[in-house]
Image (cartoon, grey):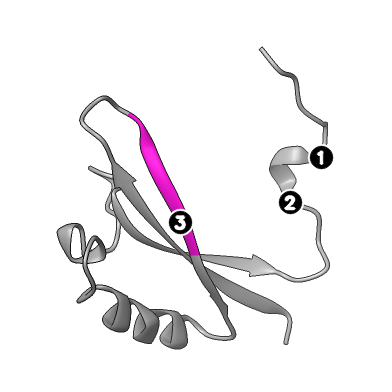
Amino acid sequence: MTGVFVLQHVHAFEDGGKDVKMLGVYGSETRAADAIARYKILPGFSDSPNLASPESDQGFHITPYTLDEDEEGWAAGFVTV
């Protein structure tokens, strides 16, 4: 296996805040989608049961990650503002 699929759910609040929940790590995108089917009928998740879209990041996110590689966005470190 060279990669995994991370499933998260984002719930946006009216004040602009967000609650991000990491739901699982799966060996295929199909298994991550199967998990969405299980989660989206549960309380809370059923309020925003869809995959996030370009118009809104609220909902489920499936993100592919390659194993044993550094995340590109952090290669130069970070700064706290």
- Give the magenta part as a residue range: 17-22
Q: Is residue 63 above or below residue 40?
A: above
Cα separation, mark 2 vs mark 3, equals 20 Å
**Which residue was labeled with disc 3?**
21
Do the CB atoms of the residues marked 1 and 2 lie less than 8 Å apart?
yes
46 lies left or right of 1 = left
Residue at 42% over, 87% down = 30
**Which residue was labeled with disc 2?**
71
Looking at numbered disc 2 in the image, what kind of residue is underneath it?
Glu
Looking at numbered disc 3 in the image, what kind of residue is underneath it?
Lys
Looking at numbered disc 1 in the image, what kind of residue is underneath it?
Ala
**Which residue was labeled with disc 1?**
75
What secondary structure characterizes most of the magenta part? strand
19 lies left or right of 73 = left
Neighbor class of circle 2 (other Cα within 10 Å; few <14, some 14-19, many 20+) is few
Dot 3: what SS? strand
Residue 60 falls in which quadrant of the image?
bottom left
Task: Measuring from the top left, give residue 4's x and y in whole percent.
Answer: 62, 76
Report the quarter where the N terminus lies: bottom right
Residue 37 falls in which quadrant of the image?
bottom left
Q: Nearer the viewer, residue 80 or 56?
A: 80
Is residue 49 in view from this perspective?
Answer: yes
Residue at 59% over, 85% down = 27
